Image (cartoon, rainbow, N blue to C red):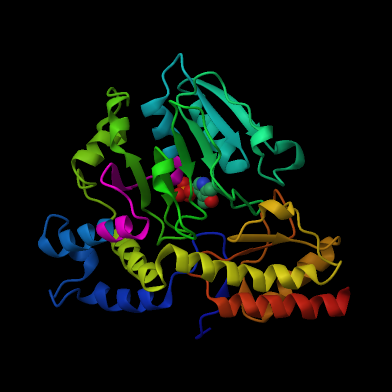
Amino acid sequence: MSERIFNFSAGPAVLPEPVIKQAQQDIWNIENSGIGIMEHSHRGPVYDKVHEDAIANCRKLANISDDYAILFLQGGASSQFFMVPMAFLGKNQTADYLNTGVWSKKAIKEAKRFGNVHIAGTSEETNFSYIPSAAEITYSDNPAYVHMTSNNTIYGTQWQTEPTIPAGSFLVADTSSDMFSRPIDVSKYGLIYAGAQKNLGPSGVTLVIIRKDLLERANPDVPTMLNYRTHVEKNSLFNTPPAFGIYIMGEIFKYFLGMGGLEGMAKHNQKKAAFIYDALSESDLWQLPARADCRSLMNVCFRTASEELNAQFIKEALAQGMSGLKGHRDVGGMRASIYNAFPPAGCEALGQFIRDFAKKHG
Ligand SMILES: *Cc1c(COP(=O)(O)O)cnc(C)c1O
């Protein structure tokens, strides 16, 4: 196949075209240095500029104050599942978790190794079809922190606003599947983390934003590489960083700024999702597992009542140049992942395909 197709993969996911084109050059020779980005010393001036620009543009995008450090770590979002409680959950303390899907459950499992976990809210009884409301959330007396998953990649649900948390606690968010898809008020959080490969870049780098004063309460007795303080003090350059991933992330931050920043990204993503949700609303053939008031702009989950028709949909869509539409096994049916870099034309094409398919089979 010589042309690129519409890639609805849940992750790793599509990257912005201008960024890929720039990267093609910079892999060969960046900034006329005669050396490609992956071959530069991470202690040299060319890489240093890439690194500093990525941090500065991230700060600019979400208006992140100097009270926060911006880190580029390895080990994926999955390593944050244990780094957070390792740092902030003492043996006799309790952390509160909002259980909105499999990724939340994985975070909960790791936290239990370090201290007590209180499930402050859950939608597990409906296979995570919704986000608990304030009335459905009950916190423990004095939680060390409250952990949420902002977008639930598998079920297609998304928090519309942050939950209000008890005074004295701080909010931790796994934003892997919706980071920078809309404005985010970083001052409401103590720690935010996101694996890059859905919304921000290639796999291999994890964006972590941490309020610096929290380092004073962090457990100092952890391995050097797993200590947030190490990475804050060394500006993510304690050891060799995932330089290529950071380079791509930096280019993507510039691309987001060029799209009108996070306000611009929100409009862009709303428009994209509407192409698909509108088409789905036009026929009773379609069932949407996520409750209407919690639907995600990043992962659109849908199905028909027939396994056979679902399989046919996925097969015919692929023949028309739309790949990655098979839903996660825990939900079944179809899932269109339309993260930040996914093009509007692909959403329009899928919307049209959904209409044509419903006409034939509805
Ligand atoms: C994909 C995903 C993860 C896993 O991220 P890794 O970087 O592979 O560890 C965690 N949380 C959410 C919400 C995800 O969508």
The location of residue 39, given as percent across then percent down, is 19, 65
Q: Which residues are magenta?
A: 56-78
> Is residue 37 rendered to the left or right of residue 361?
left
Name which quarter of the figure residue 53 lies in. bottom left
- Nearest the viewer among 157 and 17 is 157
Q: Residue at x 39, y 43 (%)?
A: 187
Q: Residue furthest bottom?
A: 2
- Nearest the viewer among 24 and 126 is 126
- Nearest the viewer among 282 and 204 is 282
The location of residue 116, given as percent across then percent down, is 52, 20
The location of residue 13, given as percent across then percent down, is 50, 64
Q: Is residue 307 magenta?
A: no
Q: Is residue 3 above or below residue 39?
A: below
> Is residue 73 rendered to the left or right of residue 278?
left
Is residue 243 visible in the rendered image? The answer is no
Q: Is residue 222 above or below residue 98?
A: above
Q: Residue at x 72, y 71 (%)?
A: 278
> Is residue 60 rendered to the left or right of residue 144?
left
Q: Is residue 270 above or below residue 225?
A: below
